[in-house]
Image (cartoon, helix red, strand yellow):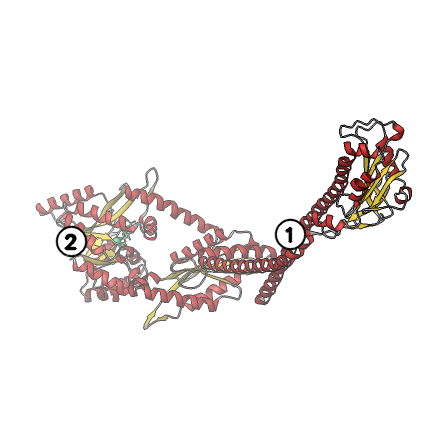
Amino acid sequence: MRRGVGRLSRRTAILCLLLSVLIIVMVAGGTVLTAIGEVSRHANQLDDDRSRQTTAGALKTFLTQLGATLNDYAAWDDAVANVYADDTAWMISNLGDMSDNSALFDVTLVLDNEGKAILAYQDGRPQTIPPQDFFDPSFWRLLEEAKSPNRAIPEARGFVRTRKGIAAAGVALIRMKSGALDQPAGNRRYLVFARHLDGKVKALGDTYVIKGLHLAAPDHADANYVAIWDPAGRVLGKLAWPSRAPGDVSYSEIRNKLFTAMGLFGFLLAAIFTIGFIEMRRLKSDEEAARQLALTDRLSGLLNRAGLFKSLASMIGEAKDTKSDVALLYLDLDGFKEVNDAYGHGCGDDLIRSVSAGFRCLIPEGAVLARVGGDEFAIAFVRKNCDAAAQSLAATVLNFFDEPFQIGERIVTVGTSIGIASSQIGTTSGEEVVRRADIAMYKSKESGRGRAFVYDTSMDIDRETILSLEGELRKAIEKEELGVVFQPVVAASSLDIVGSEALVRWNRSGGRPVAPDVFIPVAEKTGLIEPLGLFVLRTVCARAGAWPDIGIAVNISPVQLRNPSFASQVAAILDEAGIDPSRLTFELTEGYLIQNPQRARQSIERLKALGVRIALDDFGSGFSSIGYLRQFGFDRLKIDRSMVSGIDEGDAARSLLEATTALARSLGIPVTAEGVERETQAHVLLDCGCDELQGYLFGKPMAAEALSALLAEQDLARRHREPRQSFG
Ligand code: C2E
Ligand code: MG
Ligand code: MG
């Protein structure tokens, strides 16, 4: 469905793209064509104007040439002498004959003052038609103008109509070259030259390069013409020519090239757009893939922490819209570190993949699954009233871990601790839900692992206490503000002090002392136990030199034992203090042995190889197995205070005590009883075969100086052979 929608929109996008290319090409082409059309129109206009000016100039030159010729002949001393003397022969040969085949004029008239022809020649022959009939009446205006006393030069010229056609005509007073004339006004004579346009127009067109120049009627309607006016202001005709339209020619020449160019441009543009579009889509999909990769955990293929937060944000939005809740299960694998340490990271990775695959099958449809840390996972889903569904899913997940995993040829058992939190109707932010589920998960861990807890606000208080304690404890270790006290351990038979147990103390600066039961778990969780443990050991060793005759016991935590370099650290401290390792007993509780027997045995063996002894502490306080004594090679058993205090409660407890000590004895393992507060208890314990006793009855944990004083007192008593009180 999603693919279909994607394709449809891609096709639409390509169509839009091509359409825009078409529009761009059309607009660009249209603009270019309009511009070129404008240029060509302008070119046509320029050419027409130029032709008009040239034609007008040609007409003017035609008339001017005639005028110049007329002036040459009329202002001529010989003409004055002969014309006014009525020398007809001279007039014919010098004026009349000149009209034959002349490029300058084809009609010659000599008129008297009244306009009567004294000589009339046309094309070298006498003209029979009287001038009044030959010329249009407007011609006579020229004669009047030439006669006019206002004119500087007694000449006039203009275009006139004749019987033969349109002609340029000029009238000039025949006079001396100097302009003088000694003739009375009534006896003046005028020379007339006329030159017909008809038949000369083509030559004019050739001379002035105006193709198609022709003489047209006055009513000629074409745009390209120059009108020929007569002296009366009437249009005689028009010199016309067809427009050459050079712009149109250029336009039509380049139009085809332009269309080809536009086609190429369009093709290029379409190609660029298409390549750009494809490239953009590729970049987008690369970007999408990179974004997806950034949200994915490589090892498991699940979402990573960032992916979880992103999904949670949208789930919370959905929950708000649909009035639902977002449930979050935060899971931490129990025992994963041990698998990793024991079998290597390859095996650990395979385990993560197997667990991820299992989770994928368990989660409800639409749920989000993420790996948020090394061995931490999260499952989130949206549901109305999600609490029951979340708890039921947690139960399913816990069941899933009942079965071991097969990793290659190994069978691996891990568990999980689960914390559950929810965002009711999307009111709690993703970050806060994760924080709450994480706290609830820690609660599950603390409560014995392999279980699920739902977050409640009291957990925050615990967590805050741990967090604030952690900070203070870290500073206290750095500043060596911790102290060590020593509790005497006495021989059951003689009550002589034969040893002491070192117990760490923390007097918070400005606060009350914090019990080891409170801060030791914090130190274990936060890794502070390692520097703390080494500090205790160093302090003990520094003091123990003063008590060469007694043994010293130091408690160690499983976390220390897990550190492979712990044994060598111990060896270095003992060596530095010059303490015989056989004087030192490490006290260890059972928890670690149950969790990881194989590694525990290795660590114990390394310590024992140094010559150090190992005691099983707090026996009887929880899950106690006498089998451990032999299995791990313990050198001593310490019976827990809870078992000792049970002595007063009845026979059953006493029987259990007797059975325990009998078993230890049968294994050849000596027994210490802890928490002995009353003499009655001490008697029973002695009867049961405990060889060492420890408790407030014999001494509370005390400063090293106090123990030194006690030992000195004991020494003195021995020397005076004053045996202490005995139960023997
Ligand atoms: P634990 O090793 O079993 O130490 C004996 C605890 O019993 C001590 O408590 C001691 O003060 C208490 N005790 C001894 N005799 C009596 C008695 O007659 N009556 C009563 N009511 N209590 C008695 P403390 O010092 O509070 O230590 C608690 C636990 O903290 C220790 O139990 C041990 O597991 C742990 N711890 C103490 N110091 C260290 C240390 O340096 N390192 C580690 N890892 N754990 C330590
Ligand atoms: Mg102890
Ligand atoms: Mg103990």
In terms of secondary structure, where does tag 2 sit?
helix
In the drawing, does residue 25 fall left or right of residue 187?
left
Callout 2: 10 Å neighbours few (<14), some, many (20+)?
A: some
**Whole-percent x, y for residue 42 in the image:** 69, 47
Q: At numbered mark 1, what does the secondary structure look like: helix, strand or loop? A: helix
Residue 664 percent location from the top left of the image = 21, 64
**Residue 496 visible:** no
Q: Residue furthest bottom?
A: 409
Q: Quadrant of the N terminus?
A: bottom right
Asked if disc 1 and disc 2 are in contact, CB closer than 8 Å, the reply is no
Give the percent coordinates (x, y) of residue 506: 30, 44
* Residue occupied by mark 1: 32
Q: Amino acid at mark 2?
A: Arg
Q: Is residue 234 above or below residue 266?
A: above
In-image side of 582 versus 85 (left or right) = left
Which mark, residue 492?
none
The answer as to whether callout 2 falls within 8 Å of ligand 2 is no
Viewer-proximal residue among 199 and 569: 199
Whole-percent x, y for residue 224 in the image: 77, 48
Q: Is residue 43 left or right of residue 122?
A: left
- Please, what is the three-letter code of the amino acid marked with disc 1? Val
Residue 154, above or below 297: above
Q: Nearer the viewer, residue 248 or 22?
A: 248
| Labels 1 and 2: the sequence-earlier one | 1
Q: Is residue 182 above or below residue 689?
A: above
The residue that mark 2 highlights is: 583
Query: For the C terminus, which image quadrant?
Result: bottom left
